[in-house]
Amino acid sequence: MTPRARPATAYCRACRGRKTPGHYLCETCWFTVPAPARRALTLRDAQAVDRLRALLNHINSGLPLADLEITP
Ligand SMILES: [Zn+2]
């Protein structure tokens, strides 16, 4: 298997709806996330993977996206 064969996730991590490839969430869920957390999640730096993990942990815990807190 080559890295190229890995498909972009096409479904929202929170609601399993369709989303834009390259985004973590669909538009509906994304705009439910508080603005400071949204800003942090759009940064692409060394901590980006940690932020994504925090987002997924939050979703997996069943907590509402509106309560998500992520600091850069
Ligand atoms: Zn969604």
Image: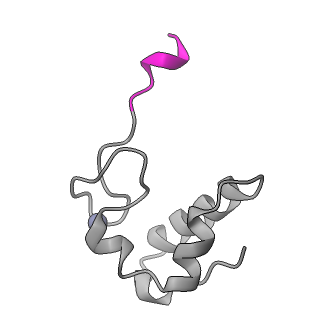
Q: Where does residue 40 sit, x and y in percent of width and height?
A: 63, 72
Q: Quadrant of the C terminus?
A: bottom right
Residue 71 image-quadrant placement:
bottom right
* Residue 5 is inside the magenta segment: yes
Q: Which residues are magenta?
A: 1-7
Among all residues in the image, which is located at the extreme right? 46
Q: Position of residue 4 (x, y in %)?
A: 48, 17
Residue at image coords 40%, 36%: 8
Mark yes or no: residue 68 visible: no
Question: Left or right: 10 with respect to 5?
Answer: left
- Residue 21 location in percent, x, y? 35, 44
Residue 37 sits in which quadrant? bottom right
Whether residue 61 is situated above or below residue 4 in the rendered picture: below
Ligand 1 resides in the quarter of the picture at: bottom left
Does the magenta-highlighted stretch encompass residue 40?
no
Residue that sits furthest to the bottom in the current view? 67
Q: In front here: 65 or 21?
A: 21
Q: Is residue 8 above or below residue 28?
A: above
Tell me which colouring the rendered structure shows.
Answer: one colour
Is 14 in front, or is 46?
46
**What residue is drawn where x is 70% and y is 59%?**
50
